[in-house]
Amino acid sequence: MAELDLSQQIRDLRTTLSNVREVLNPGKLLGEIDELKTRAADPNLWNDQANAQSVTSALSQKQNVLDRLNDTIARVDDLEVLVEMANDENEAESRNATQAEAKVELAELTNNVSALEVQTLLNGEYDSRAAVVTIRSGAGGDDATDFAEMLMRMYLRYAEKHKLPTAVLDISYAEGAGIKSATFEIDAPFAFGTLSVEAGTHRLVRMSPFNAAGKRQTSFAAVEVVPLVAMTEAIDIPDADIRVDVFRSSGPGGQSVNTTDSAVRITHLPTGTVVSCQNEKSQIQNKAAAMRVLQSRLLEVRRREEEAKKKQIAGDVKASWGEQMRSYVLAPYQMVKDLRTEFEVNNPSAVFDGDLDGFINAGIRWRKTSELD
């Protein structure tokens, strides 16, 4: 009976984990956690709800990172023991089962270590923020609006698989199929840093279900990802700079909708930025949610302007993102390929069901490499 040898793979995991430990600095993390716990135990903390939410969110995020790191280190040690147990088994059936268990654990640990390593690259100014994602259909008629809805489901499924809380703020349904646009929040630490690499133009190639001749159709959709502003962060938007319109919430045919003018649309006059929200039950709640999204978008505009100035000073004229960053091909062959990182898979169904980790991890590594060039 052949022995299972995973010694090289385990050594590689330990090397990567050692590098991750050096960057994450568990000792420093533990000190920050203790300080946050002290602040969280202050009986007056919740007198300022915005500050309290900031403290508890930071505590949860840092504790989660430390727990994941320690758990992964312990599991690598356990994997080494599991391999030894498998090779010590005398009975073939039992040995095969234990070896198979060790291989599954190795695969899971490889993914976990890779995710931890990628997180060490999320050190941008806004990377730790929650995210606001907006999807808009582009050229391609009904195929484009259907594609936009497929992308919305893809990101919501990704969030669901990773247990990230989401809230759909606004959907504009198309007359034919799918959606014209949708905006939703992913309210979790590092959601912006993680998903910001998904921003750009996405392309779908398939045999169109909306074409009687069944011809191949190319359609496009745009994905925008901006950091969600913190409750404690003030972005001054004078009342004179905005126009607020209220209207009745809408939905697809037959769906129960509000019977009052509770939906809110805010237009930022200086920039022309328009934000709508109809998810909440009251006009006041919708206006508050829409203002948060508007502030988030204006914050991102400011960040991009500052980044453009830095690049201009440095003489860097290279564009960071292409007009088309990913292709989803369903015909004549099956493939999803990121045109920046060259990462590709041959299972579009899994990707549309939220299996995005490979693309996101490759995107984050690519972005970091591009910043260093």
Image: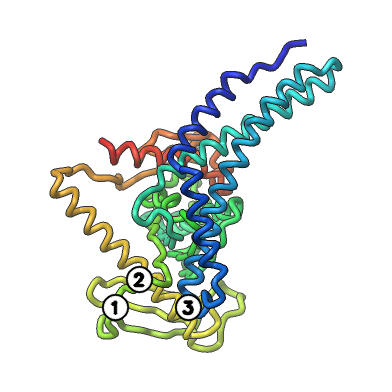
Q: Nearer the viewer, mark 3 or mark 1?
A: 3
* Colouring convention used in this rendered image of the protein: rainbow
Q: Total label count? A: 3
Determine which quarter of the picture holds residue 98. top right
Q: CA distance from mark 3 to mark 1?
A: 22 Å
Query: In this picture, is 194 found above or below 181?
Result: above
In terms of secondary structure, where does tag 3 sit?
loop
Furthest residue in direction bottom, as rendered: 260
Residue that badge 1 annotates:
237
Determine which quarter of the picture holds residue 4. top right
Q: CA distance from mark 2 to mark 3?
A: 21 Å
- Residue lying at 34% horizontally and 45% vertically, measured from the top left: 324
* Label drawn at residue 295: 2
Q: Residues within 10 Å of mark 3 (few under 14, many from 20)?
A: few
> Residue 104: image x %, image y %?
68, 31
Query: In this picture, is 228 found above or below 102?
Result: below
Task: Point out the image quarter for the C terminus.
Answer: top left
> Residue 138: image x %, image y %?
37, 57
Task: Identify which amino acid the numbered label 2 is placed on.
Answer: Gln
**Quick one: label 2 or label 3, which is nearer the N terminus?**
3
Q: Residues within 10 Å of mark 1 (few under 14, many from 20)?
A: few
Query: Does residue 50 appear anywhere in the picture?
Result: yes
Q: Which residue is more in the foreground, 324 or 185?
A: 185
Side of 148 relative to 271 (left or right): right
Task: Point out the image quarter for the N terminus.
Answer: top right
> Residue 321: image x %, image y %?
30, 46
Residue that badge 3 annotates:
48
**Quick one: label 1 or label 2, which is nearer the N terminus?**
1
Task: Identify which amino acid the numbered label 3 is placed on.
Answer: Asp
Q: Are marks 1 and 2 in contact (CB under 8 Å)?
A: yes
- Residue lying at 60% horizontally and 38% vertically, measured from the top left: 72
- Residue lying at 56% horizontally and 76% vertically, measured from the top left: 43
